[in-house]
Image (cartoon, grey):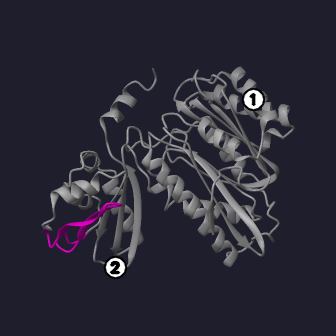
Amino acid sequence: MEIITGGVTAAKGFQAAATAAGIKYQDRMDMAMIVSEAPAAVAGAFTTNVVQAAPVKWDKKIVAGEGPARAVVVNAGIANACTGEEGMGYCQKTAEAVEGSLGIPAGQVLVASTGVIGMQLPMEKLAAGIQAMAPSLSGTKEQSHQAACAIMTTDTKPKEAAVTFEIGGKTVTIGGMCKGSGMIHPNMCTMLGFLTTDLAISRELLQEALKTDVQDTYNMVSVDGDTSTNDTVLLLANGMAGNEEITEKDENYRKFTEALNYINTALAKKMAGDGEGATALFETKVIHADTKEHAKILAKSVICSSLTKAAIFGHDANWGRILCALGYSGVTFDPDAIELFFQSKSGSIQIYRDGVAAGYSEEEATKILSDEEVTVLVDMKMGDAEAAAWGCDLTYDYVKINADYRS
């Protein structure tokens, strides 16, 4: 596997475009479109929130169907959530607008929205945006980057990733982009994510691969404990790499899932590090747990702890908060047996062992916690299972951003 630059246009046969439609924002691009030159198998994973936006309902039907997909249209600024039948009608009209501009059947058009809940979309602006994007569709890295920028809301940076790998002598590529900064919590983590690959693979295995991988990637991210109404990850595979179609879980399938995991992990960490108001990516790694499920529960408990997140922001080695978060996770363990460490590019320091503080240097701990990426390593001393979860520090700016989000 080789890591390359690029995003949703890295794979063969995929094009992207972006435009400023003025849906909510008046000073930036706010619409993006992804189009596959060939019909693509499609897989999806969606929010677990009972309140689901119209685009989620629309996309679920397409993913559950037997037909291919060819296009994705995304808007930022208005979520099209809690908008009733009118909102569902806008999904249909958006797909029909793509059909009118590109000749792609409306039933092969996926839609996604992010932004304020409860507002109706200005359909005339969406239709105009689609018309503006159609002639500028391109497979260049520049267009991929523009699309990644156009789907942002409170994000401060675009999020892209791409890799290549070999299957049967053919070079296969996976690329992706996502947005996510606030209202982010596991199952699914609050986000929009779009993945493209030129791999030939059965629809069933594509869906299984995505469904399995989100459990260890996007579902291990939390910024603020809120799960969105719009969470969507879509994966399109158009087969243009020319490999023999993958129809069973063989070595080729393993190579694909390994590459898919890299893309999803990279994008998940980019979201966590760009949490609203964040100054640091906060990772928790749990090792030597008795089961994988317990390792995941423990890791998520720490990165979801508001007190721990605040301590990371203050560069304060307040290990008691970490121990507390582990203790209320629901997993049974011996507090006197575990060990805790802080790690970053500045080094590693043990902060807890044998049930007490490890006699560490506060100055050294503060230096480690002052880096842009900080890891808490938890050694449970119970078995061989491990897991990682990602979040960010909790800052004053998080409250500022969300206090006036609608204005």
**Looking at the picture, how far across and down is residue 148, in whole percent?**
61, 42
Q: Residue at x 25, y 55 (%)?
A: 367
**Residue 99, located in which quarter of the rendered image?**
top right
Image side of residue 10 versus residue 38, left or right: left
At x 52%, y 34%, the residue is 153
Disc ID at residue 202: none
Q: Is residue 22 visible?
A: yes
Q: Which residues are magenta?
A: 333-356
Task: Measure how far apart labels 1 and 2 are at the Cα level.
Answer: 54 Å
The answer to whether residue 250 is visible is no
Residue lying farthest to the right in this orientation: 103
Q: Amino acid at mark 1?
A: Lys
Residue at 63% of width from left, 22% of height from top? 22
Circle 1: is it few (<14), some (14-19), or many (20+) Cα within 10 Å?
Answer: some
Q: Secondary structure at mark 1?
A: helix
In the displayed structure image, the side of residue 360 where residue 107 appears, left or right: right
In the depicted structure, whether residue 258 falls above or below residue 370: below
Q: Secondary structure at mark 2?
A: loop
In this view, 118 is above or below 326: above
Q: Looking at the picture, how far across and down is residue 98, in whole percent?
A: 79, 34
Residue at the spot 65% in from the left edge and 72% down from the top edge: 255
Give the percent coordinates (x, y) of residue 266.
Answer: 52, 57
Q: Quadrant of the C terminus?
A: top left
Q: Residues within 10 Å of mark 2 (few under 14, many from 20)?
A: few
State the residue position of label 1: 93
In-image side of 109 versus 280 (left or right): right
Which quarter shows the N terminus?
bottom right
Q: Disc 2 designates what residue?
A: 383
Quarter of the view holding residue 56: top right
Q: Amino acid at mark 2?
A: Gly
